[in-house]
Amino acid sequence: MARYPSTVIIATDDPRIQQEARRFGARVCMTRSDHLSGTDRVAEVASLAEDAQLVINIQGDEPLLDPDAIDAAIMPLLEEPAIPMATLKKKIENPAEIHDPNVVKVVTDRFENAIYFSRATIPYVRGNESHTWYKHIGLYVYRRDFLLRYSALAVGPLEQAERLEQLRALENGFKIRVVETEYESVGVDTPEDLERVQRLIQAGRAAVISGGTN
C-alpha cells in the first residue's frame, strides 16, 4: 500500500517464516543466521539487489506500521542526496511509555537529525517544566551503498549497551534524519505486546466486516 517501494522481500533465516511467507505468495530471501541485527540481515539481501538505489528495512515486529509513514521516511532521501539514512519518530501520548525501556526514545537537533536513541528517558527534565518526548518507530531507509558499508562499521559500546542497531551509524559519525509521523505503531517486544496487537488486528477486521455489511 506504500507508494514508493517497488519490491517487497521478506528476509529471514527461519524456515517457518519462509514457509508461511510463501503460503501467501510473498517473495522470500533466506539469509545467514549469524547476523548481529536486522540491518545486517537486510544488507545481505541488498548486496544481491544491484539495481536498488534505496533500501527500506520494515521490521517484522512492527505489524501495524502505516503505509503513509513508510513513504514519509523515504522522502528525505529522495529530496536530499547527502542523507545516507532516515527513520521515524512519534510524539509519546501515553505517559507510561516515557519510562518503558521497551519503548525507544529519540532526541534530535534543530535540523531533525538524530542526536541519540535510548531505552532510558531522554532528555531528563530537571525541574517541573513541561516537555515533549518522542519514541522511535523502528523503520529505516538507507542508500544502498551506505547500507553495504554499514555492516562493516565497528560495533561500538553504545550499540552494545543499548542493543540498538541504529547507534552504529551515530557512533561512526554518520547522520540519521528523523521524520516525525502522526501514525501510531505498536512494536511487539513482549507477549503482552503480541496480545495487544492481536486484539487491535481483530478489532480492525471486525470494523471492516461491519462496514461492508451496512
Image (cartoon, rainbow, N blue to C red):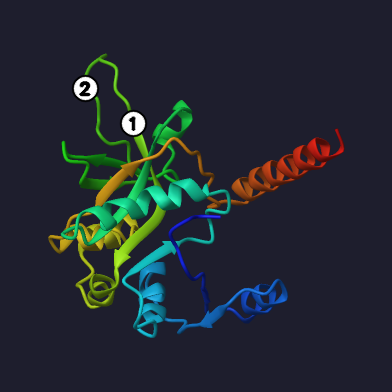
Q: Could you tell me the amino acid type at mark 2? A: Arg
Q: Could you tell me the amino acid type at mark 1? A: Trp
Q: Residue furthest right?
A: 213
Q: Give the mark nearest the N terminus, 1 or 2.
A: 2
Q: Total marks drawn?
A: 2
Q: Residue at x 37, y 78 (%)?
A: 46
Quadrant where the C terminus is found in the figure: top right
Label 2: element kind = loop
The numbered disc on residue 142 is none
Q: Nearer the viewer, residue 52 or 142?
A: 52
Q: Nearer the viewer, residue 208 or 36?
A: 208
Measured as percent of width and height from the top left, residue 129 is found at 25, 15
- Look at mark 2 in the image and give the residue it sits on: 126
Disc 1 vs disc 2: Cβ atoms closer than 8 Å?
A: no
Q: Residue at x 47, y 83 (%)?
A: 31
- Look at mark 1 in the image and give the residue it sits on: 133
- Above/below status of 89 relative to 81: above
Q: Residue furthest left?
A: 173
Left or right of residue 61, residue 156 in this image? left
Neighbor class of circle 1 (other Cα within 10 Å; few <14, some 14-19, many 20+) is many
Whole-angstrom CA distance, mark 1 to mark 2, is: 14 Å
- Above/below status of 196 relative to 34: above
Measured as percent of width and height from the top left, residue 122 is found at 27, 36
Q: Nearer the viewer, mark 1 or mark 2?
A: 1
Q: Residue at x 47, y 56 (%)?
A: 3
Measured as percent of width and height from the top left, residue 39 is found at 37, 68
Label 1: element kind = loop
